[in-house]
Amino acid sequence: MENNIISIIQDKGISLVLSGGGFRGAFHLGVLAFLDDNNIKINAISGTSIGALIACSYASGVKPTKILEIFESNEFKKMVSFNFSFKSFLKITIDKKIMNKLFLKENIEDLNIPVYLTISSISDSYVIYQNKGKVIDEILKSISLFPIFETVKEGSKIYADGGIFDNLPLKPLKKYAFNILSVNLHPNKKLKSLSFFSKIKKILFLVWYSNIIDSIDNSDYYITNDNLTKFNILKQNNNIELFNLGYSSAKKKFPN
């Protein structure tokens, strides 16, 4: 049965869930590259934070290897810097040339396939699965993980990273008649150390992780890799290694 999986999903295509996970996002690109190389059609994508950014770029027509090339550019890396205003640890300075390369469509509703961006409404305490509006504006909301990045204020509303409420946003894809593949950048790795601080760190992780367990259980296919924990979510210098890890993980999941 395992050997027939790839032919089954080639016939019907899939819906895709991309988790948040900071600069581990190149792992998603490796998975996407594998799907493209094997002619697996993606019919809809739901993403949180970096997953939302990659979803919009891919759905606008940019190939995974091209997105990787942009991620590797100095211009892209320079968009993130320390925030000396003390409103957050880091700030994002938009480079329009880079944005025009990353996103070939201006509006979410004009993308080549349906895309849903997960955004947390802090002022109203609920999650939004956004499928319309300006691509860049909505992505900035989805990636604004406070206190790393500033929250986004729009009128009286305050928005922040979608992963606060739903870091593996499967829910918007349930209405589609396709198998769902979920890709998670935060594996639940077994606790190796029994030290006091290791146990605290693990418990805090599990409290946050609990909001995605239902999504994992309801995915038809699920990809993660324990080696992802070796990569700091705030460091931009591991894109190639993460891309290769994502590609090999997808290949292992869907053997030819």
Image (spheres, helix red, strand yellow):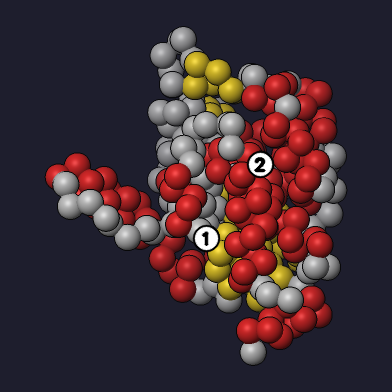
Helix, strand or loop at label 1? It is loop
Residue 3 to residue 215: above or below? below
Residue 46, placed above or below residue 99? below
- Looking at the image, which is closer to me, 227 or 71? 227
Q: Which residue is mark 2?
A: 240
Residue extending farthest to the top is 84
Residue 207 visible here = no
Q: Is residue 43 left or right of residue 247?
A: right
Residue at 38 percent of width and 59 percent of height: 188
Label 1: how many residues lie within 10 Å, few (<14), some (14-19) or many (20+)?
Answer: many
Q: Quadrant of the C terminus?
A: bottom right
Read off the residue under disc 1: 224
Q: x, y percentage for residue 117?
A: 62, 49
Looking at the picture, which amino acid does disc 1 mark? Answer: Thr
Q: Earlier in the sequence, mark 2 or mark 1?
A: 1
Q: Is residue 171 left or right of residue 177?
A: left
Task: Quadrant for residue 2, please give it.
Answer: bottom right
- Which residue lies at the image location 49% right of the left edge and 67% below the top edge? 215
- Residue closer to the observer: 221 or 49: 221
